[in-house]
Image (tube, rainbow, N blue to C red):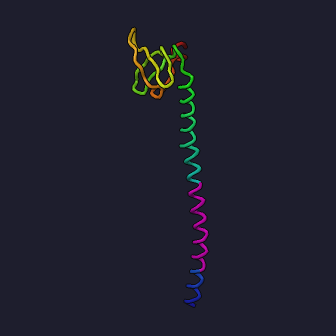
Amino acid sequence: MNLSIMTLLQAQGQAGQSGGGLTMLLMLALIFVVMWLFMIRPQQKRQKELNAFRDSLKKGDKVVTVGGIYGTIVEVNDNKVMLEIDKDVKIKVDKASLVKDFSEAQQA
């Protein structure tokens, strides 16, 4: 009797282990899908919007740099932008350091 109970428990344990591996695989897949939906996809969308913003820069746009310097674009080159931050004060910055456009916000 003792032997039959042990055999039955071992059979149930082995059946549970094979299903457990599949469950673990499904849980990992679910975690990856959730991470992609809530973390990776929104970051990719923000990066595309930022690249589109940087490509559409033109003279007269009011922008802010990553360092918090507000200015108006005076000249746009391939990778650099000349900003006027005060009357007759101009600085040259990399396009990658520009993060926001305040042209529409200032007019409203």
The magenta stretch is 11-29
Residue displayed at 57% across by 28% down: 52
Residue displayed at 56% across by 25% down: 55
User: In what quadrant of the picture does the C terminus appear?
Assistant: top right
Q: Which of 61 and 27 is in front in this view?
A: 61
Point out residue 40 in the picture as x, y percentages from the top left corner.
Answer: 55, 43
Point out residue 79 in the picture as x, y percentages from the top left corner.
Answer: 48, 25
Residue displayed at 55% across by 48% down: 35
Point out residue 93 in the picture as x, y percentages from the top left corner.
Answer: 42, 23
Based on the picture, tell me whether residue 12 belongs to the magenta stretch.
Answer: yes
User: Is residue 16 toward the left or the right of residue 70 in the image?
Assistant: right
Q: Is residue 59 above or below residue 37?
A: above
Based on the picture, tell me whether residue 68 belongs to the magenta stretch.
Answer: no
User: In what quadrant of the picture does the N terminus appear?
Assistant: bottom right
Point out residue 65 in the picture as x, y percentages from the top left corner.
Answer: 43, 24
Q: Residue 56 falls in which quadrant of the image?
A: top right
Q: Which of 16 and 22 is in front in this view?
A: 22
User: Is residue 23 toward the left or the right of residue 85 in the image?
Assistant: right
Q: Nearer the viewer, residue 78 or 84?
A: 78
Please, what is the dominant secondary structure of the magenta stretch?
Answer: helix
Q: In this view, does 27 lie above or below 101?
A: below
User: Is residue 72 toward the left or the right of residue 49 in the image?
Assistant: left
